[in-house]
Image (tube, grey):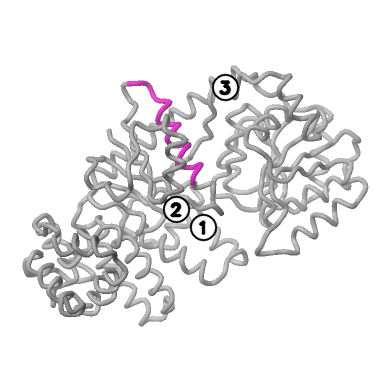
Amino acid sequence: MRIGLRLFYNPSWMGGVNYVLNWARALRSLPRDECPHVTLLTAAPAAQVIAERHAELGDAIAPFQQTSALGLDFVYPATQLAEAPFGAPWAGWIPDWQCRHMPELFSRGETARRMLQYRLLAQHAPACVVSSRMAEEDTALLFPDADAPRRVLHFPAVFPDEAYARSAARVAATRARLGAPERYLIVCNQFWRHKNHLVVLEALKHVRRDDVHVVMSGVVSDERWPDYADKVRTLLTHPDVARRATLLGPIERDDQLDLLLGALGVLQPSRFEGWSTAVEEARALGLPSLLSEFAVHREQSPPGARFFDADDADALAALLDDWFAAPPERLSPEAARERQAGYVRDCARTFLAIASEAKRRYDPARHDPKPITAAALVELKRDLADGRILPEDEALFQANARALFREHPEELARLGGYIGEEAYPLYPDAMNLMIVASLAKMAPEARRRFFEADLEGTAHAARSALASPAGRISLSAIAAAAKTRDFVRRKLNL
């Protein structure tokens, strides 16, 4: 099987980058006869750098814009329609519905953006991947009539063999250099409000044992809630907290791994996780974990996990006392590596099963970005008229769609086969807002490709697409696309 993994780059969401790289590692872990051919697809210069840095995880590296020419059986992930490929089966990915459960953490615009993007994936993707049963239940509740099959795909943490072979001397040296004591629990989270560091610091005021200690890594800030860092720092002035907590700030990944290997366990107090990387890393390294009582943490439930109420500092204090009095047993590095290898292979096989299903279900007339865009423009116009979305939500979708098509002038020309028909409900407005507006920002070479694009390949797909809600196309898609190009020439005075 030929798999394309889309590497996106967002400096404020490195978890997304690591998610894709971990799937590349997981697929590489399969036996030779099961291992797929993997192409790392890059959509930005920074993503190209990441792909080249991790070239050993793939068989090839290619620009995402070339996907349709690569003969791929499956492309993943797309967190919005603008990340879907042309000419290849694909699946959408909804990591979680934090915007629904904790709306106070998001602006109204960001919440609307996520709701809209995820809705389109749930309705139109060949398959819709979610990271947990909680996300699957949320998606079913929000979009009970969505067409895309929902599949839960748990992502594992994947460490190289070298991680399990690190010496005790190396781990001790890192611990000493960073100022961590010999015995500690570790919290590996950014200091965002919902990560709930405060319950840990409050608990440290109430523990009885002098040897209880918690090490925390991550930048101490949350731009959405600037007072949160002040609350953290205020608690750290309490003498009992100050002697029992070490804040390291941001640290190198290698140092973090050493500290994980040297810890008595992982402490994860978060109020919300899509699928906790910290918990998966505890599983991978054979570390026992102390987790907040939360549906996703219960679903993850790595061996040796204990749970506590995220709002009960006294109960957590008692658990910390018990933990340090008699630390839970942890696996040896060899046993942890062997157990995790089997778990990772199982996850990789689930990934390939979803890929095979998406390939079977993929119908260009329904799942290519062109018919989805044409249908979505009509859906959103109705949503706007009914008050379900705001004008800026519709405008954001249009802008993202134009950004996708600007990278693919030939596909933009073929889009005319879907929106260039008088029978299409938004004819000819859609040609202005999608095609003319896209071309207005294109370089001359891209415009030339638009006018020279071969339209034959879109005929069959366009004729059978959009039975509902956008309306069945009755005339030849080739004629419709050609008519659209004539329309554009007149509009642009070409």
Q: Secondary structure at mark 3?
A: helix
Q: CA distance from mark 1 to mark 3?
A: 35 Å
Against 74, is 93 above or below?
below
Q: Amino acid at mark 1?
A: Trp
Q: State whether residue 130 appears in this view.
A: no
Q: Secondary structure at mark 1?
A: loop
Q: Amino acid at mark 2?
A: Ile
Check residue 262 in the rendering and tell me which mark sits there, or answer none: none
Numbered-mark total: 3
Q: Viewed as shown, does residue 244 lie left or right of 491?
A: right
The residue located at (20%, 80%) in the rendering is: 491
Q: Which residues are magenta?
A: 17-32
Res 419 → quadrant: bottom left
Residue at label 1?
Answer: 97
Which comes before the other along the chain, label 2 or label 3? 2
Is 21 within the magenta?
A: yes
Q: Are marks 1 and 2 in contact (CB under 8 Å)?
A: yes
Q: Viewed as shown, does residue 225 lie left or right of 126?
A: right
Check residue 162 in the rendering and tell me which mark sits there, or answer none: 3
Q: Amino acid at mark 3?
A: Glu
- The quadrant of the image that shows the C terminus is bottom left
Q: Are marks 1 and 3 in contact (CB under 8 Å)?
A: no
Q: CA distance from mark 1 to mark 2?
A: 8 Å
The residue located at (41%, 79%) in the rendering is: 391
Q: Residues within 10 Å of mark 3 (few under 14, many from 20)?
A: few
Q: Nearer the viewer, residue 314 or 230?
A: 230
Q: Nearer the viewer, residue 405 or 146?
A: 405
Q: Nearer the viewer, residue 65 or 35?
A: 65
Residue at label 2?
Answer: 94
The residue located at (14%, 59%) in the rendering is: 453
